[in-house]
Image (cartoon, rainbow, N blue to C red):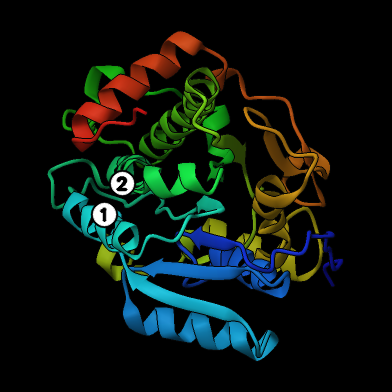
């Protein structure tokens, strides 16, 4: 049996938290743990029925939870803009934004509504646009923004020669490229916030590896059955061997987003063997994420592609 892991989380009563990708898996675990700490949690979801199920799941554990859903498709810049405009109109400062949503390794290249490679669009560009649209509320809340990357950001590189993978698509390299770009961008966000006194803190987390739907059968992505990898991960996770659970994998992002000791520009993940599972702790930044020149390049290109501006 897997070892049950939990962490102390500060009292978040009165705090507003937005968690992307919280309709299932790690994102749902993040939202559930924050609701237990009395935060008000907004779940932006692409599928309203899954969102309703997530709300019911959270309230089954935390009956008094303040949790609601909004419609958001991160692969559509129009959807991101509409979501951001709606929250800005509501006018409530945001205390925490956890950019967690993502998709992983469609077997063939797919394009977003805006024509971008789907992993790059969903994992990275959509979150860039989301942060830009929410910037007034994030500044008003002196928010902490936690960007969820992946251990895949420790291999491969940003594919600058073919950013949208139009010439030769590789599912895993494309996934890594999107996560490296996202991590570089989030670190640059922290540097720019400090330089311009935005009052925003931006850091990184990764969940290790656990059995979630990222590698499960998803016919809409062209994956008709579970991958061999996810079957192995499920089997070992059930036995408490090597891999974490969705609940334990949620904790690095929760720690990075809420713990008083977690700082901007830092990286948090599981502390166990090979950082695949275990309690959260600060970790050494991956080599792919250390170049400030690469980060500035990602920042500029991402703003141009997403059609947004992040400035005071």
Circle 1 sits in a helix, a strand or a loop, which is it?
Answer: helix
- Label 2 or label 1, whichever comes before in sequence order: 1
In this rendered view, identify the residue nearer to me: 309 or 217.
Answer: 309
From the viewer's perspective, is residue 54 above or below residue 238?
A: below
Say which residue appears at 66% left-offset and 24% top-offset.
285
Q: Is residue 24 visible?
A: yes
From the viewer's perspective, is residue 265 above or below residue 25?
A: above
Please name which of the two marks, 2 or 1, marks the residue nearer to the observer.
2
**Number of disc labels:** 2
Residue 107 in the figure: left or right of residue 283: left
Location of residue 131 in the rendering, given as x and y in whole percent from the top left corner: 38, 44
Quadrant where the C terminus sits is top left
Q: How far is mark 2 from mark 1, CA to CA?
A: 8 Å
Q: Are marks 2 and 1 in contact (CB under 8 Å)?
A: yes
Q: Is residue 215 visible?
A: no
Residue 40 placement: quadrant: bottom right
Circle 2 sits in a helix, a strand or a loop, which is it?
Answer: helix
- The residue at which mark 1 appears reads as 80
Quadrant where the N terminus sits is bottom right
In this rendered view, identify the residue nearer to me: 172 or 118.
Answer: 118
Location of residue 165 in the rendering, given as x and y in whole percent from the top left corner: 23, 32
Residue 273 placement: quadrant: top right
Name, please, the residue furthest toward the top.
Answer: 293
Location of residue 139 in the rendering, given as x and y in whole percent from the top left corner: 47, 41
- The residue at which mark 2 appears reads as 133
Say which residue appears at 39% left-offset and 42% top-offset.
135
Residue 206 in the figure: left or right of residue 153: right
In this rendered view, identify the residue nearer to me: 219 or 298.
Answer: 298
Say which residue appears at 73% left-offset and 61% top-offset.
248
Near mark 2 (Cα within 10 A), the count class, few <14, some 14-19 or many ≥20, is many
Say which residue appears at 62% left-offset and 24% top-offset.
286
């Amino acid at each position: 049996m897997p070892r049950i892991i939990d962490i102390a989380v500060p009292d978040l009563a009165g705090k507003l938290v937005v968690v992307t990708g919280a309709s299932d898996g790690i994102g749902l675990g993040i939202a559930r743990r924050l609701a237990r700490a009395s935060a008000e949690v907004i779940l932006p979801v692409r599928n309203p029925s899954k969102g309703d199920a997530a709300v019911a799941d959270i309230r089954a554990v935390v009956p008094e939870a303040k949790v609601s859903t909004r419609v958001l498709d991160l692969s559509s810049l129009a959807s991101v803009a509409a979501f951001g405009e709606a929250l800005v109109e509501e006018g409530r400062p945001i205390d925490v934004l956890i950019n967690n949503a993502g998709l992983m390794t469609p077997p063939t290249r797919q394009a977003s509504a805006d024509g971008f490679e789907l992993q790059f669009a969903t994992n990275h560009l959509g979150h860039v646009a989301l942060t830009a649209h929410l910037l007034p509320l994030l500044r008003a809340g002196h928010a902490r923004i936690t960007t969820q990357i992946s251990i895949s950001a420790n291999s491969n590189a940003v594919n600058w020669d073919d950013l949208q993978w139009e010439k030769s698509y590789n599912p895993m390299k494309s996934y890594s490229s999107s996560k490296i770009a996202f991590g570089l961008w989030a670190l640059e966000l922290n540097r720019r916030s400090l330089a311009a006194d935005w009052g925003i803190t931006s850091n990184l987390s990764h969940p290790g590896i656990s059995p979630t739907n990222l590698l499960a059968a998803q016919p809409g992505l062209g994956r008709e059955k579970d991958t061999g990898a996810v079957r192995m991960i499920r089997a070992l996770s059930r036995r408490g061997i090597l891999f974490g659970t969705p609940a334990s994998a949620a904790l690095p992002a929760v720690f990075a987003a809420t713990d008083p000791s977690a700082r901007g520009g830092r990286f948090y993940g599981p502390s166990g063997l090979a950082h695949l599972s275990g309690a959260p702790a600060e970790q050494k930044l991956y080599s792919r994420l250390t170049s400030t020149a690469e980060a500035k390049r990602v920042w500029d290109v991402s703003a141009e592609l997403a059609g947004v501006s992040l400035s005071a």
